[in-house]
Amino acid sequence: MNTKLTASKVAALRSESSRYRVWDSEIQGFHVRITPSGRKTFVLTYRFQGFVKEYTIGIYGNLTVEEARRLAKKLSGKVADNIDVSAQRKAINAEAYKNARGSLERFYSDMYLPWAEANLKGHKETSRTIKTDFKHLLNRNLAAITQWDVQKWASDMQKKGLKNTTLNRRIASLKGVLSKAKEWGVIELSPLAGMKSLRTDNAPNVRYLSDKEKERLYSALSTRNESKKLARQSHENWASKRNIKLKPSISVVYSDYLMPLVLLAINTGMRRGEIFNLRWSDIDLDKRLLTVRGEISKSGYTRHIPLTIEAYRCLESWGGDKASKDLVFPSPRTGKRLDNINSSWETLMKLAKLDNFRFHDLRHHFASSLVMRGVDLNTVRELLGHRDLKTTLCYAHLAPEHKAAAISLLNSDAAS
């Protein structure tokens, strides 16, 4: 099958009983390979000195179609210059392997990072953790890193107020890097193998909005939205008088992405990254159903979320006639995927006078609201996309009527 590989076409490809390939009609040899498990891998097939060779570019979801196309064009250019790109990669990897038996910094930069960029969604956060949190270990030989080094660091961070859950997550990033070093034969044994996680509260406090806090959040969203709309109208009037053409407003209802993005989060429980990666092809407004694709979800599994009335109206007003467009919330500056909304979120929290409330807490609010209305935890688990029910159990205390019903059985025994 030959077609121009685009974001919408690759997203629509489905797994079959056997592996198959879809070839790009513009870049010779560039194609996507789909396995029965649903994994989609970008590959470049080329001929060098009479032999047919393959170069694996990366996995869809970690790479966008546009990024894969750019890499394929670059690789094709090298092949045209009589360079065997597969052999070149092997030579680079061999040299990196040879040099990697030194410091953490060298192994991470030369071997781990190139692999992570092609295979891990969270490679940017891992990179930040290694280069910032474990900066003091970068010059240390891999085998010379000890559990004491990490435990000492954790103790220092605890004194600065970091929670054990956060510390465990960052230590896990370092463990992952060292595990790969062992897997690739760079070291014989990971020095952090068997290291126990820091003790955490199995039933942590869940931050969700009270009725008054929710009213303040919605009021702040509306106030911000109207203020920006008035500013936009004023700017349009100024430009009109000077015959300056401006880009048309994205939506008549919303001034920018923040209000619809927040409303969608609080009504679906989606993670921030899932919303950033959401495409219009994932939304069926007729069926009022939203799909979180496995390649953009943390669990790796696809899930379907029915839209509340508010979420439906929000997307309808934001999308309008844009159902054929790509990202639901593109960056207003680049038109590509949003990177973060930290600044606008902090401003919104000040306007709403909300303390200690993160964007991720909108997900907690969604789950808490369901549990407090009697929805069973397994259904909540499915809507949130948790792999394990244990993760969802942190909301169990919000349904005290189950415990009360159990105690009432003892009361009936006493009465008799």
Image: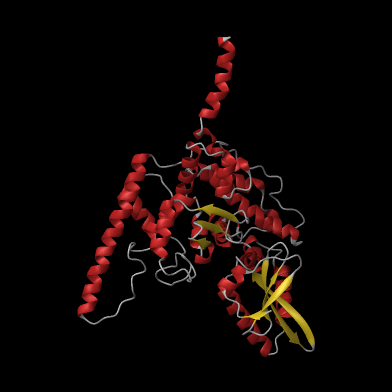
| Residue 127 seen in render | yes
On screen, residue 257 versus residue 19, left or right, reads left
Question: Split into 4 quadrants, where in the image is the C terminus?
Answer: top right
Image x and y of residue 141, in percent? 67, 58
Residue found farthest to the right: 50
Residue at 60%, 38% (x, y): give it.
Answer: 199
Residue at 60%, 65% (x, y): give it.
Answer: 61
On screen, residue 246 versus residue 51, left or right, reads left
Q: Which image quarter: residue 390?
A: top right
Residue at 53%, 66% (x, y): give it.
Answer: 281
Nearer-the-camera pick, 98 or 383: 383
On screen, residue 83 versus residue 415, left or right, reads right
Q: Which image quarter: residue 16?
A: bottom right
Asked if 189 appears above or below 113 in the picture, the reply is above
Residue found farthest to the left: 241
Image x and y of residue 27, in percent? 63, 84
Figure label count: 0
Image x and y of residue 380, in percent? 55, 44
Image x and y of residue 206, in percent? 48, 40
Nearer-the-camera pick, 402 or 128: 402
Question: Split into 4 quadrants, where in the image is the N terminus?
Answer: bottom right
Color theme of the render: secondary structure
